[in-house]
Image (tube, grey):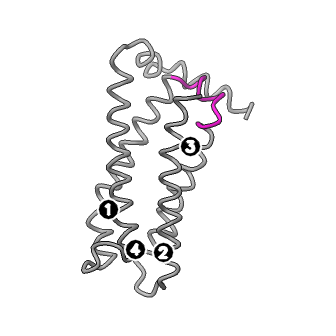
Amino acid sequence: MQTLLPFFQWCNETAIGVAIRNSRVLFPIIESIHLLALTVLLGTIVVLDLRLMGAGLRRQPVPFVARSLGPLTFWSLLAMLVTGFMLFASEALKSYASPPFRVKMVLLALAVLFHWTVFRGAVNSATLGRIRSVATALVSMTLWFGVAMAGRAIGFY
């Protein structure tokens, strides 16, 4: 991790990081947008995961639900990533020493990778068995809620 210290220092000194750190209102506003985006993201993920497990919207085909929620999922993820970087830049050196931050970044990378590969393939598959559907949904929810919980833990470290 020592090799990442210069990157964290650079992020800490960016104009956006300094501006947010020196403002009394920017951090809470950006964090509110970040949490709103996370809420929308988790909402779309949970609805789709429940459908994948056969626990909701049973009359709607899984690919239809996925297509319907896709734009909300994408835009909320994008908003979450942009605001997350802004928050990170404002306290990059604090994040450097934070184990929950590291856990969140690993889980976020895994969740995004899983969502755009395995999960996406599962929701678009017509031949996915019940066990694979449920397992895919459970892994998805575990990863995304892990991101949220690790993010919350950052504030306590």
State the separation of the CA atoms marked 3 and 4: 25 Å
Mark linked to residue 70: 1
Amino acid residing under circle 3:
Lys
For marks 3 and 4 on the same chain, the one whose residue lies earlier in the sequence: 4
Q: Could you tell me which residue is drawn at 57 percent across and 55 percent down?
A: 110
Residue annotated with mark 4: 52
State the separation of the CA atoms marked 3 and 2: 24 Å
95 falls in the magenta region: yes
What residue span does the magenta drawing correspond to?
91-101
State the separation of the CA atoms marked 1 and 2: 20 Å
- Mark 1 touches mark 3? (CB < 8 Å): no
For marks 3 and 2 on the same chain, the one whose residue lies earlier in the sequence: 3
Amino acid residing under circle 1:
Gly
Few, some or many C-alpha atoms within 10 Å of disc 2 (few <14, some 14-19, many ≥20)? some
For marks 1 and 3 on the same chain, the one whose residue lies earlier in the sequence: 1
- Mark 3 touches mark 4? (CB < 8 Å): no
Q: Could you tell me which residue is drawn at 73 percent across and 35 percent down?
A: 1
